[in-house]
Amino acid sequence: MEKGHTKQKSMASSSTVTKAENGQSSSSSSSSSKKRGRGATTILELPQPRPHQPKERSPLTIATLRLVREKAEKRGKRTSLAVSVRHFDNTDINYNWLLPGWVAEERYVPSGRKGLGRIYKYYYDTTGHKYYSKREVLFAWKKMNIICLDP
């Protein structure tokens, strides 16, 4: 393999990167590196994402999710089968700013092209009221005297 080039291989169980001695990276074909016959290579293992593990939710979060589901059932089934919905609470790293019992919902809506789509985010308080943005949530907290925001 040519010095200063890397090659990524996709395997079923793990990904590997072949790296040249000097540590620089670029892409090249393996046939050209065999012709030139330069440099020794090492193989590095890339970290694999951990499988999704369900975590313990607080009783307040469970109560909020129950209210959200009840309100959705009253409205009727209006979501497409292609839409995936995930819920998060303040124990998730991206939503650690939420108060206990508040829930964030992410809806992934795929578009016509493969791999593209849009993520819609909604936030629910402990009564099941829906907020459409983080800014709206923070304003509601200020209005309820839960937190005070500096201008």
Image: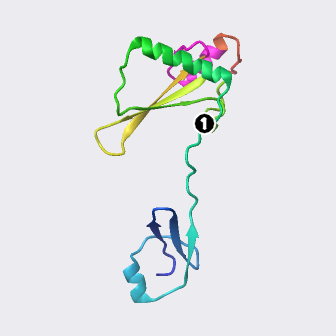
Crowd band around label 1 with a 10 angstrom C-alpha radius: few (<14), some (14–19), many (20+): few
Taking 65 as reference, is 120 left or right? Answer: left
Secondary element type, mark 1: helix
Residue 75 visible? The answer is yes
Residue 101 visible? The answer is no
The residue tagged 1 is: 94
Residue 20: x %, y % from top left: 54, 78
Magenta highlight on residue 15: no
Taking 48 as reference, is 30 left or right? Answer: left
Taking 105 as reference, is 112 left or right? Answer: left
Report the front residue among 16 and 120: 16
Quarter of the image for residue 111 reads: top left
Taking 91 as reference, is 67 left or right? Answer: left
Q: Residue at x 70, y 21 (%)?
A: 150
Amino acid carrying mark 1 in the image: Asn
Tell me where the magenta segment starts and ends, as one range: 126-141
Residue 48: x %, y % from top left: 56, 57
Q: Which residue is drawn at 45% across and 16% down?
A: 72
